[in-house]
Image (spheres, rainbow, N blue to C red):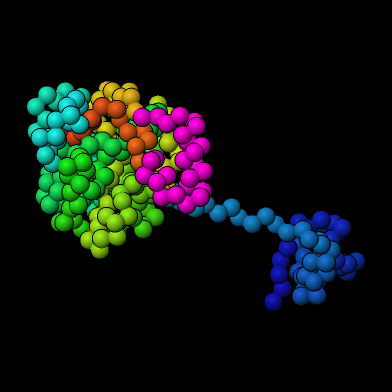
Amino acid sequence: MGISATLLPSSLLLPHHPKQNATATHLHLTRRSLLFLSTTLGGFSLPAPLSYSSPSPSPDTTITDRVFLDLSICPTYFVNRTLGDDLALCADAEPVGRLVLGLYGNLVPITVSNFKAMCTGSSGSSYKGTLVQKIFPGQFFLAGRQGRRDKGEVKPPTKLVRNTETVESKAFLLEHSRPGTLSLCLSENDDDNDVKLDPDYHNVEFLITTGPGPCPQLDSKNIVFGTVVEGMDVVGRIAGIPTYKPSERIRQYNGIAEFLGDGRAKNARAIWNKPLNTLYISDCGQLKLPTPPLSPTLP
């Protein structure tokens, strides 16, 4: 069966019978003719049709839950040790303010559920009465380190769900692009190794970015699961609390000690960036969602 080609260039037309109409615009090609055309055209080929792929859907940052953290300073914590293991009993606490956090329960439901349980105390532990252990000026602050309650650390929780989202790629889609981003610490986690080696270990340490700029060094390494919806002024006050900063000489000595395998180097770094004031979570809990619910927000 022949193949019809329309309006071929005159230089490519095959010889035809003289009696054929010279103005003919159609030519029937045999298989041999097609081979001739392919060698004549060389590497020329028609452009392939453009293909369009649908954009991947944006992460669901609908705020499904709200919790609060009340923060205070206890000026006598390290002087008066009669408080025992509960910083919340500090009688001369100086309130810093309240943070209201919106959580992305559709995106990372396990991470959000565990965080809520730590705020309400249903996990067998709570953030209440525990320290904000580190502040990195211009970047973020850390809270929720596990360990000894008499040191202001979180009691290891016993009633949390195993968080499988720490190995799921979708949990790392959001970036630490603005102040007030709430994130589960993975790369920044500083729980002691003996705590992490417990078979029932659950990571509950979290960070909140303080700005003014983004923190790209945290992206793809920590799980963003919420944002500050009220209290950015409180975040600013926290960011302004002075911290312990080692001198350059101490940093150099520490680097040499670590290089030589001296375990004391890591212990010494544990106090770097600690707030000089005893900043702690004086209360925490869950709040009702407003009506209508909050619209999605992307950090």
| Magenta range | 244-269
**Numbered marks: total:** 0
- As displayed, is residue 178 above or below residue 223? above
Most common secondary structure along the magenta stretch: helix
| Residue at image location 18% in from the left, 53% down from the top | 157
| Residue 20 in picture, x, y percent from top left | 85, 65
| Residue 125 in picture, x, y percent from top left | 14, 48
| Residue 87 in picture, x, y percent from top left | 14, 35
| Residue 34 in picture, x, y percent from top left | 77, 70
| Residue at image location 73% in from the left, 59% down from the top | 45
Q: Quadrant of the C terminus?
A: top left
Horizontal side of 172 relative to 152 (left or right) equals: right
Is residue 260 one of those drawn in magenta?
yes
Indicate the quadrant where residue 149 lies: top left
Residue 69 visible here: no
Indicate the quadrant where residue 144 lies: top left
